[in-house]
Image (cartoon, grey):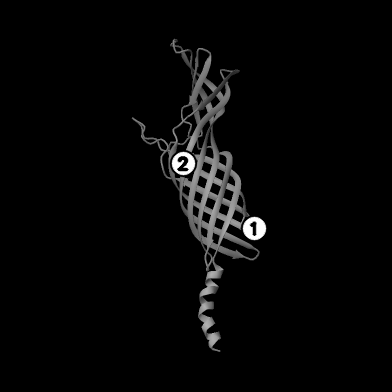
Amino acid sequence: MKSTLLLLPLLAVALPAAAQHTEISGRAGVGLFWFGGPSAEGTSFVNFANNFGQPNGYTNNPYSSRLGAGLALGARVQRVGQRNGLVAFDLGYEWLRSHTTITQIYYSQAATSSFSGAYRADGRTELMAQHATAFVGVGHRFDAGALAIDALAGPEAAYVFGFREKGSGTYNGNLNWAIDQPNRAASRFDARLRADATVWYQRLGFNASYSHGLLNYQRGLLGASPEVFARTLRLGLAYKLR
């Protein structure tokens, strides 16, 4: 009887601890990327030059409100508490792009010529970049029969690098234009807020998350104050490794 009474406090401590556990998972899917803010536009024009046989150009406003599809990968460590509370740390790598519809080209000849002209044009350009992300989320796991639903929210930090702009189309009837601009923008850090949800069936899950950028990608321009902010929607599959 004494031994039973002594075991009761130990069980009271051990059972909640046993209910807590750590999970490790990976995810892969599509990343949909665009820019928000008052200066984000879906259409723009290209400044295009032909300098000594070397075509060159760039989109006047490459920060487009039109979303493009890319790749989103990630790995997560998550602590599940005794009352299904969640604390998660997620690292991600993403290759993302937005696209801009081109309606006009401002064309100039070689640098030695003063000729320039504006032409109606079609085609599109894409602004591509790589994103390394770190997300810390807190939330709750909801039981729904055979399914478990994880809901998380928290801050996200991102390092955005490898900006490149590419595009092509036609102008002045049937003339072709094409641009390819590596290092289109400087690498930068971004601060974001993120909402994240995963529906689990045993080890397999469907993950969706949305990141809302808080830092202006065009801050610091002299003589103007445009505002554009990153937006990312991720959809994909997740798998519990542990």
User: At 50% from the left edge and 43% from the top edge, which residue is drawn?
Assistant: 132
Which image quarter is the N terminus in?
bottom right
Question: Which residue ends up furthest to the top in the rendered image?
Answer: 112
Quarter where residue 218 is shown: top left
User: At 50% from the left edge and 33% from the top edge, which residue is drawn?
Assistant: 163
Q: Earlier in the sequence, mark 1 or mark 2?
A: 2
The residue carrying pointer 2 sits among few (fewer than 14), some (14 to 19) or many (20 or more) residues within 10 Å by Cα, namely some
Label 2 residue SS: strand
User: Mark 2 = which residue?
Assistant: 159
In-image side of 54 versus 217 (left or right): right
User: Mark 1 = which residue?
Assistant: 203
Q: Position of residue 55 (x, y in %)?
A: 53, 18
Query: Which disc is residue 238 wearing?
Result: none
Which image quarter is the C terminus in?
bottom right
The residue carrying pointer 1 sits among few (fewer than 14), some (14 to 19) or many (20 or more) residues within 10 Å by Cα, namely few
Question: Which residue ends up furthest to the bottom in the rendered image?
Answer: 1
Q: Which residue is more in the foreground, 117 or 137?
A: 137
The kind of residue tagged 1 is Arg
Q: Which residue is more in the foreground, 141 or 121?
A: 141
The kind of residue tagged 2 is Tyr
